[in-house]
Amino acid sequence: MPKKVNRVLLGLVGLVLLAVGGGVLATGLGMSVPSWWPFGGRDDVLLSEADRTRWRDSGWWWPVVIAVLAVLVLLVLWWLFAQLRRHRLAEVLVDSRDGEGAVLRGRALENVLAEEAQTLDGVERAHVSLTGRRGTPRARVAMLLAPHAEPAETLDGFTRGPLAHARDSAALDSLPAEVRLREVKHGARRVS
């Protein structure tokens, strides 16, 4: 699940819970609430006796309640598993050409890519994370560039150097990469 969607959903749920909780607290403390607010005072209940028993004898009521609750539980479980899912690739499947294949630790390939990227001219730091599937990994690279670095040359050097070496050494058909370049923050030079 994209981070933005996750943050928006969490924000909306939080706002709704905060508004409802604040309104219930204000009503319980005897503060004035708007006329449209469903609770009128301290002794008011959430559901009256008539509201609780209105649909009890209808044949469709309980199946609908159970279905809605089941859908809600499934959505919450899906969201929970989406949060717990590992975003980094644990291992990469390497074709050893013997029919069985070999497994390369994802962290090892990430570290080698990052270290080799840091040897490029103008790269201060590099961070690499692998995503995707075992047989078709994708690289996400963040490089911090020195003030004298040329972004186009650095990107070309990374594509021809570390990325090509990683692709060839892991015997991958392709290794798509998303590269983010940032510059080192530095103060202005003063002339005296």
Image: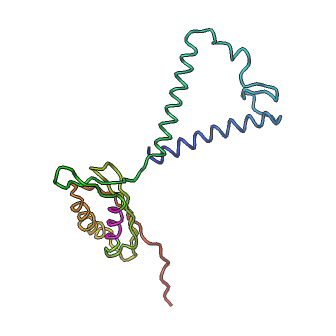
Q: Position of residue 150 (x, y in %)?
A: 32, 72
Residue shown at 59% from the left, 39% from the top: 13
Residue shown at 52% from the left, 46% from the top: 7
Examine the rendered structure and indicate whether residue 170 appears above or below residue 7. Answer: below
In the image, 90 versus 56, the foreground residue is 90
Examine the rendered structure and indicate whether residue 126 appears above or below residue 1. Answer: below
The quarter of the rendered structure image containing the N terminus is: top left
Examine the rendered structure and indicate whether residue 158 appears above or below residue 38. Answer: below
* Residue 40 magenta-highlighted: no
* Residue 112 magenta-highlighted: yes
Q: Position of residue 165 (x, y in %)?
A: 24, 65
Q: Position of residue 180 (x, y in %)?
A: 37, 61
Residue shown at 52% from the left, 35% from the top: 76
- Left or right of 133 in this view: 68: right
In the image, 189 versus 20, the foreground residue is 20
Q: Residue 47 occupies which quadrant of the picture? A: top right
- Left or right of 113 in this view: 37: right
Q: Where is residue 65 in the image (x, y as percent from the top left)?
A: 57, 20
Q: Main secondary structure of the magenta part?
A: helix
Examine the rendered structure and indicate whether residue 5 appears above or below residue 101. Answer: above
- Per the rendered image, the range of residues in magenta is 108-117
In the image, 63 versus 10, the foreground residue is 63
In the image, 32 versus 125, the foreground residue is 125
